[in-house]
Amino acid sequence: DPRTARSRVAMLLSYIANARVDAVVGGIDGSSRAACHANTNHAPHVGASRARCAQVHSYAYTSPTPSMFETLFLEQWWTYVVERWIPLWVAPNALTCGGLALVACAYGILWMTSPGLAHDAPGMVYALVAALMFSYQTLDGCDGKQARRTRSGSPLGEVVDHGCDAACTCVYGIILCDIVGIGYDASALNRAMCVGVLTMGRVFFAVDTVSSTYTGRLPVNWFDVQEMQICLQVFMVVIAFTGIEFMYDITAHVPYLGTQPLAYVLVGASILSGLQVRSTTAYRTLVANPVKPPHWPAHRSPMAIVSYCAVNELFHGVCLFYAKNLALAHAASTMLFAESETRIMSIRVSDPNFPLTNWLSLAIMACTTLVPEGDVFTSGILIGAALFLLLNRAASLSAQITGCLGIHSNIFVLRPKQD
């Protein structure tokens, strides 16, 4: 019975939200309910306080400037899909989470067929992964349009979208390492290159998170994430038929490094380009910005949060480098990264004093370095613990925002909550 299944899922999420993890990692969870300070007609809800309720109601979404591919064809494609194929009763969060499910499928397929990240998968696997990632990108672009179409936009929708994008960023790092055939186990240098790609992509995403949290608007360049996704997807389709041998047959001279294959040159250029763009973005939005946003707490330094994110991701990178079971370490790290980004977003949408440090997260990541390859039992425990932390944060934030705004507690339901 679908109703029974939904009831059981809701009960499970309720138990997770009430797990009192806040006693260890800080913040709030589902066990802390109080009267709403923004609307006395609403029932008591999670995390109610004067400052938190004011922060939830101060939220206002500002659309970012369209990038090149969005202007050329993506916006038109997303509008067509929403108006032609998506019914009005479908919740935007369902589109977002559906896209994440497609990413999870691509992630699992790639790990099963190329566990060493050495481009060992059959050619058609890369075409399939490209199709799944484009489908995710389409649903990710449609959720905002569906929210405006159904007038169901809320701060929770932006957090759900951003958390899914955080997980997707980690998956794209794995895809990039594999399609150029770096090979995690080939040598210490190759392992360092893989970890460097994974870590820098996450640092860049975290910088954008802090910038968007601080300014209230996601910083977008003319050639940005949407364009990078399309380029990677097209490249995956090409190599599905040609292979990647040409990327090692073609070489280029790199100052101080000598002659290097094209694959390594492209990876290095991607990292350096991203570093330059994100550094400029951070300076422009966080340092040189003369206007202090009214929703940002005066006692919190955005650059201090950026520094914390960089150190946190470097710690994850070290753990990934020394992990004996990379698939386990990366899966756990992906979930913990999404939880960490949700904490940053919470400063803007739900709690100006929300703590960033999650000591359980750091402990779980450290433990992944001790698990030998093939230890399914311990791997399952650590991945389950990471997933629990992510669900706890998501369920608690959902209960807080839906309770404060008086909307339905099920994020996949559009109709208003009935009193």
Image (cartoon, helix red, strand yellow):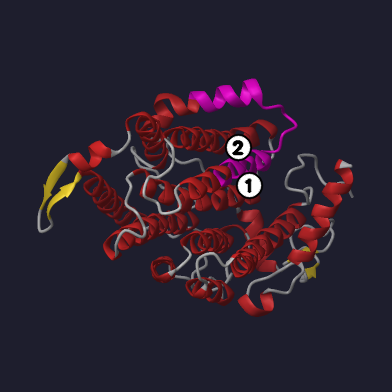
Q: Residue at x 54, y 76 (%)?
A: 363
Q: Characterize the local packing of mark 2: few (<14), some (14-19) or many (20 or more) Cα atoms within 10 angstroms.
A: many
Classify 298 as above or below 281.
below
Find disc 2 in the rendering and name its residue: 143
Give the amino acid type for the residue marked by disc 1 in the picture.
Gly
Magenta residues? 76-104
Where does residue 235 sit, x and y in percent of width and height? 35, 34
Q: Residue at x 77, y 56 (%)?
A: 403
- Cα separation between marks 2 and 1: 9 Å
Q: Characterize the local packing of mark 1: few (<14), some (14-19) or many (20 or more) Cα atoms within 10 angstroms.
A: many
* Element on which disc 1 rests: helix
Q: Is residue 78 left or right of residue 229?
A: right
Q: Residue at x 53, y 44 (%)?
A: 109
Classify 147 as above or below 54.
above
Q: Is residue 289 visible?
A: no
Q: Is residue 359 left or right of residue 95?
A: left
Q: Is residue 93 magenta?
A: yes
Which is more N-terminal, label 1 or label 2?
2
Tell me where residue 383 sits by quadrant: bottom right
Find disc 1 in the rendering and name its residue: 157
Tell me where residue 398 sits by quadrant: bottom right
Give the amino acid type for the residue marked by disc 2 in the picture.
Asp
Q: How would you classify the magenta stretch by its main secondary structure?
A: helix
Residue nearer the viewer, 294 or 232: 232
Where does residue 376 sit, x and y in percent of width and height? 60, 64
